[in-house]
Image (cartoon, grey):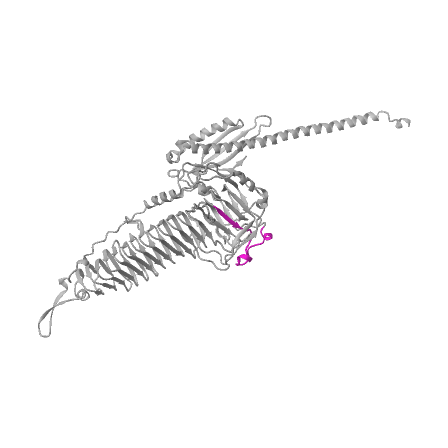
Amino acid sequence: MRYMQNEKGNALLLVLLVMVIMSTIGLAVVSSTIGGAKRTTVRTADVDITYESIKAMDSFTAGLSDQLRTNAQLALANVTPASIDILLDQAGNTVVEQVKAENAAIEDIQVRDITGEYSIDKDIALTRVLSVSITAKENEGAAVSRTAHKELIVSPLPSFLKYALGSEKGRLSLNGSPHLEGNIFANTLSIDEKAHYLTQNGTNLSQQTPKPSISGDIYVGTPGSYTDWDFDPQALTNVLVPENFYHEEVPGLKNDSQYQDVQFSQAYTEGRRAAEEKTKFLTTLPVPDNPAKNVSSTSEKLTTYETDKNGKSKRVTLSLSEYEAIADGLSDVDYKGDAVLEPRGKQIENIRVKGSLTIFADHDLVLKNIFVSGGTLTIVNRNSSTLQLEEQVVSDGGILIENEAGMIDSKEAQLYDDESITINNESQSVSFYSISSHGNITVTNHSGTVELMGPLWTQEHITLHNEGEMTVDFPNSDSNTVFSGEEMKIMSTGTFTLKNHLVSERSITLDLSDKAALEGLILAKNNINLYVQDSKKGDIYFEGSLFTDQNLTIQGNDEKSSHSENDFFSIDATMYAREKTSISNLSIRGWNDGQLVSLSGDSLLITRINEFQNLEESTEPRKGLYVPDLNENSTVQPLKGFFYTDKDVQAGISEPAAELYGVGSLFLVDGGVFAKGDFIVNAVRGETDGFNIQSAIPSLSRQDGHYSRFIIQYDRNILLGQLDYLPRVKYLSVYSDQLTVQ
């Protein structure tokens, strides 16, 4: 058994086994190292080539912008909807070659016109949408490629419309914790963690907040490009530090070399002139002939002879009423004196009265060519009859028409009076073709239907008061404008429809509730007041444009206690106020996918929007999502529009161009707000509790993780619309949409 204890040769086997194991481990390590090196090479190439594609996209955007600014053929004055496609294609090809020449990593650049995918009429609009794809490829080693894609919008819109918030030449002060979803423009920026506000007795107080949040970039202009003012970009970089922003999320800083400022005075003058060219009305009203002024005696046909008790015949002049009772119709009569008629016949025509005339219609009746001088013409329709006015109804001492029951149809009759015209409809319907006066015109509809279908003109005041259904529409008239030399007032608590322009040498006030449709221009030399109350979304809308030489007020009702906003005004319009614009206590929505663009020469005031209201859910769902998900059924609705004030910085005057609050108010804007001068925003986050602002606003500990009470969410659709009367710019601009890399 000695051989079983012999261990010779075991050492050799052990050594061989260890060598095999070590070799295997070594090969695995080498393989892993090589694979890791390859993966690192691929990742490095991926990062590098992604960077190259993005850099090339930036170069293409900048190159196209430069072409639009410097290429004389592309100057806005030389471009038409018919020529822009060819010119833009040529400019794009030039930029493509430049980008390829300066970057060897670029494999392919594709530029496609996708304007047809949007609601843009290329036959009348200069706006174009380009889809740009740039592929960069690393040909050495890993052969990685990446494609950057972006949509570029080429548009003639002024620069302020591409920002959620901005101040051109003043200081943009973000006090507290507003949230801005989109890019902002600020050459000078200050940030204060405290939101400032006023109590009801005017005391200035402040509340600490978790600071502002910006989901976008901050853009500045080009230093040295301003003729009377400049700024220091370094001062702005000192503000852009983590400790100044919500959750320490610092926005990027970029330069807007395309920025074009608004020449407000020029824009207002040119826009108003263009609007006035669309209105059609007589600047001076010719006075129609009134033959009643020449009546010196009563017509011979009203003279009859009576025999007295002595058998003698004597001459007697009948009253107009007495004559109508015995005559076969009343026609072609001169009458001197006051008269009251209750006609038995069906028609009265060619009547000339020197005095006052009152006509009571108790059955169907036609009045044709009625002339009164030196007194009042009164026409009363009774007993559900139909009263028809034809040709001319003329007076110089006032016209009063009352429809107690039944229908009045003026067909194409012309109503004129030197002093005043008053129309009252108690029920059923009335329609008038032409109403003109050198005095006041008043139309009141207590119930039923009123149609104003022709020229409505006066040198004095116009007052329309509607509680039923009223329509102002001149489809078959040479005139398309309601004109007043003095104040114009339209008040409606029923259904009101306006299909024509409004022009006043003084002020215009529209006080509307329930339902109203306004389509056309509104032009006034004094203030314009738009009051909207007790309406649902879409029930009251304005589609057109507005110009006032003074102030514009858009206002709803003051909703008390916890009542949510119920004053909705839908707008698709450009509105200019040469002086101030004030908006309060209502929700402004877009109409037909449009929006409001408001431009003010002086300060902008937007107050008491969703005052002391809260979002249905005020807690932010997770980090980075700072805009609530609202829909048309949400209790709280944002203002839909872009708001601009041209008020500049003035030496020695501390009042800002705009000062907006999201403290007691829940200030939500779907669009943008921009000021030429100083712009101050004050805001807190979270929910209010109660209606005393000092105790209602949340403490700092109850703000973090909650939506701001001041949110502006930029709406890019403004770049794709075809808006009238916007300020003119010198050249087309490029607006970049979101970048993706694949």
Q: Position of residue 405 (x, y in %)?
A: 30, 63
Q: Is residue 64 magenta?
A: no
As displayed, is residue 575 above or below residue 344? above
Furthest toward the right, the residue is 2
Residues drawn in magenta: 678-703
Q: Nearer the viewer, residue 101 or 220?
A: 220
Q: Tally the numbered discs.
A: 0
Q: Position of residue 399 (x, y in %)?
A: 26, 60
Residue at x 50%, y 55% (from the top left corner): 611
Can residue 454 be seen here? The reply is no
Image quarter where the C terminus lies is: top right
Q: Quadrant of residue 74?
A: top left
Q: Nearer the viewer, residue 416 or 350?
A: 416
Asked whether, in this view, residue 88 is left or right of residue 478, the answer is right
Q: Is residue 698 magenta?
A: yes
Q: Position of residue 486 (x, y in %)?
A: 32, 54
Can residue 207 be seen here? The reply is yes
Asked whether, in this view, residue 698 is left or right of residue 467, the answer is right
Q: Quadrant of residue 259?
A: top left
Asked whether, in this view, residue 294 is left or right of residue 220, the answer is left
Q: Position of residue 690 (x, y in %)?
A: 54, 59
Image quarter where the N terminus lies is: top right
